[in-house]
Amino acid sequence: MISVAMLSKWHVHAVDYERDIHNSSKLNITHVWDEDKERGQRWANELNVPFEPELEKVLGNPAIEGVVVDTPTNMHKEVIIKAAQNGKHIFTEKVLALTTADCKEIFEAVEKAGVSLVVSMPRLTTNYYLYAEKALKDGLIGELKMARCRVAHNGSVPSAENPEGWLPAHFYNAEQCGGGALIDLGAHPIYLLNRLAGKPKEVSAHFDYVYTKEVEDQASVIVSYEEGVTGVIETSFVSHGSPFYLELYGTEGCLLIQDGKVELRNGEGTHVIEQLPKELPIPMEQWADAIQSGKTPSISNEDALLLTAVNEAAIQSNTEKRRITISV
């Protein structure tokens, strides 16, 4: 089995990756490190593995083959490059880094070290995404002209149980996160539309600060893609019961996906699609396969780079109140 060190429990998905590893026949957690020593020690105790307070000792341990990075986003570049330089395979929470320049430095270090890097983009493995991809390839809605995707929840909404909302307070730390709802939850619509609509070229964004946090808790983004598609991205931390939407509008029909239900409308009528493609292995399993057998993951460096590129441009667009051209 591949020995793995968990690097930080800062992100809420760290426990999900812990579960994925425990459910895997290929991976095993052997160490924990955390920039917050008390949090890390508690987690190590729960997992019944050693806690190592020094990152360098974890990365220098030859028994550790891979690391799962869930540090604050502004630490990704430093931690991932150090991990690569120490020959560790890397699985990381999105986004990979805060700027495209930082992403390229990471790719260079990873390539030089000859290690595997996978960024968690789980919706690229789902059956509804794979059907949408096939529908476009097969021309079932003609030429794609507009796409819309919405992912939202109510993590910032106060309640009696959670006066500041159920998201951890550090998710509103601008320095650590690099952004708010868009960079975290909005990542999913961004990478989905980047895949379906093509390479992004221009971005116009509007952020809302509903609960006056350091970062936005709601965002709307319009993206123009090189293939002539317009994309509408919506995300929010303040929407109770909001369904997931992925909508593709073409010259000869449309594909409407809501919470996994897939409906195709074209000249042949309206059809609910029951037979969907087999899902791909989850990102964690793809990472394990890349380490063990050299199999190329379906999630690529380009996916990671363009995700950061749209986020970076959206932040600039909202700040400067103008449309931003992407150049990567």
Image (cartoon, rainbow, N blue to C red):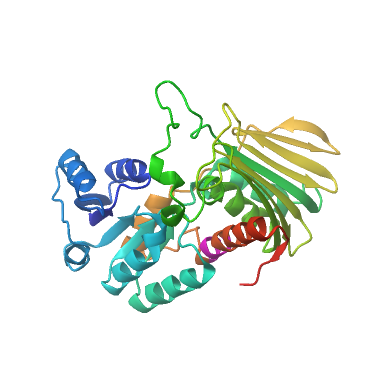
Q: Is residue 91 magenta?
A: no
In the rendered image, which quarter is residue 275 located in? top right
73 displayed left or right of 53: right
* Foreground of the two, 251 or 96: 96
Q: Residue furthest bottom?
A: 112
* Foreground of the two, 216 or 106: 216
In the rendered image, which quarter is residue 327 located in? bottom right
Q: Mostly what secondary structure, the magenta segment?
A: helix
* Foreground of the two, 14 or 285: 14
Q: Which range of residues does the magenta coloring cover?
A: 302-306
Image position of 116 with respect to 271: above or below: below
* Foreground of the two, 118 or 269: 118
63 displayed left or right of 310: left
Image position of 40 with respect to 66: above or below: above
222 displayed left or right of 127: right
In the rendered image, which quarter is residue 246 located in? top right
- Measured as percent of width and height from the top left, residue 99 is found at 51, 66
Image position of 154 with respect to 87: above or below: above
Q: Is residue 303 magenta?
A: yes
Point out the image quarter for the C terminus.
Answer: bottom right
- Measured as percent of width and height from the top left, residue 280 is found at 49, 48
- Residue 216 in view here: yes
The residue lying at 39 percent from left, 56 percent from top is 92
Point out the image quarter for the N terminus.
Answer: bottom left
Q: Residue furthest top?
A: 160
280 displayed left or right of 256: left
The residue lying at 60 percent from left, 57 percent from top is 315
- Measured as percent of width and height from the top left, residue 234 is found at 65, 43
- Count of numbered circles in the view: 0
